[in-house]
Amino acid sequence: MSLPLDGIRVLELGNFIAGPFCGMLLGDMGADVIKIERPSRGDQTRAMPPLVNGESASFAALNRNKRSLVLDLKQEKAREIILKLVKETDVFLENNRPGVMESLGLGAEDIKKVNPNIVYTSVSGFGQTGPDRRRAGVNLIIEAFSGTLSVTGRQNEMPTRPGIQTADIFGALFATYATLCGLISVLQNRGGRTVDISLVEASIAAAAWETASFLATGEIPKRLGDQHRLNAPYQLFETSDHQYLAIGTPNDQLFERFMNSLGLEKYLRDPRFASYVLRKLNEKDLLGLVIPAVQSKKSDYLENLLRNNGVPCARMNNIKEVFEDLHVIDRKVVVEVIHPIMGKMQAVRNPVLMKEGSPTIRRHAPLLGEHSREILLELGISEEEFGVLERQGVILALKG
């Protein structure tokens, strides 16, 4: 069964997370992703822990389904190779600081002169234009600048950074979405697109309720800890066995089921809690009733009780517990991958499932320069010319 992006070629000049994660998603769907890396160390994620037999598990998690071609882009012959590849490429994906690609003669205008129909996707911290376009912007800095951190954590305490790389992943998802839209544009004979993805703007867009509230009222959203901005009760509760249970009641019917489950049904007639809006306005009073009732019960008992009554809830899992969950096991979220150096590894599959042609892991994350020879021979470069380029340091190829 063919995959949705079979026949699509992507050139990825990516580093760390945002660009490589986008490239990986396209590769999972069948695209031939050629990862262009610098000599000596390649993508900087290759040096990140944990290391297994000297290879980075972090790099492996972000770079499956790709081929590695190592080029010294400071040399003109390397640029010529890229431009030759561009002629038969559908997507040019890069997440360097704005201006870097232009300085190498590989900016959007340079690439589109060679292939007008290419989709040129750039991901950067602050975008390709504006006074801060060249400002350094790694994940935490983006979270701080975009306002994400201002609404994360408890009020009157230092903000808590999210436990995952939100800005990078938001940016990668928007980049993937934009790239696919660009490919559709080409299919509709409307030409390739030049895409400018800012991690800052991706993070702002993801803060949908917070930004909507401010733009409508002018009030600055505050940190609420684990509580919900609009709904109550909707938060983490500690149980008698010191576990944390997430419980959400985003409508009147669920609130009624929740209160009945806790034996607090008499408060359903309390005018303070008669509607969605009133419950949030009187949240302190409501929690004064709910918290002691929850704290009197063990997590497993209460979770089963609420689930049986149709109330959304879940005990807070750690990562180990997630992978031990019977539902996650049944869905085969974890798959095995064979890596030539790290050996048999476990990996998280692409979360998209299709009735036909679901994304697959067809290639392990490439070793540095693993496919340099293969790619250049496909390009029509002879063995003799390949040897010359290798001796000149234009390319680097994996030995053995």
Image (cartoon, rainbow, N blue to C red):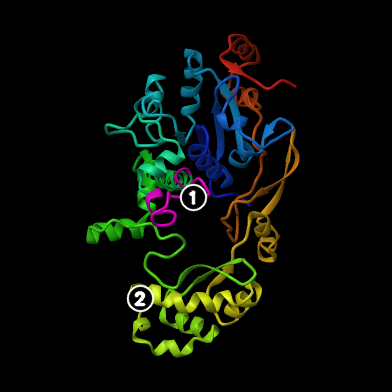
Residue displayed at 28% across by 56% down: 220
The residue lying toward the viewer, choosing from 336 and 313, is: 313
Q: What secondary structure is found at the residue carrying circle 2?
A: loop
Please tell me whether mark 1 sits on a helix, a strand or a loop: loop
Q: Is residue 98 visible?
A: yes
Instruction: Identify which residue is drawn at 58% across, 21% down.
Output: 380
Q: Residue tagged by mark 1?
A: 162
Q: Which residue is mark 2?
A: 282
Foreground disc of the pair 2, 1: 2
> Residue 245 at x, y = what percent?
57, 68
**Label 1 sits on what residue type?**
Pro
Is the residue 116 above or below the residue 288 in the image? Answer: above
What's the magenta region?
Answer: 149-168
Q: Looking at the figure, which quarter contains the C terminus?
A: top right
Q: Is residue 121 visible?
A: no
How would you classify the magenta stretch by its main secondary structure? Answer: loop
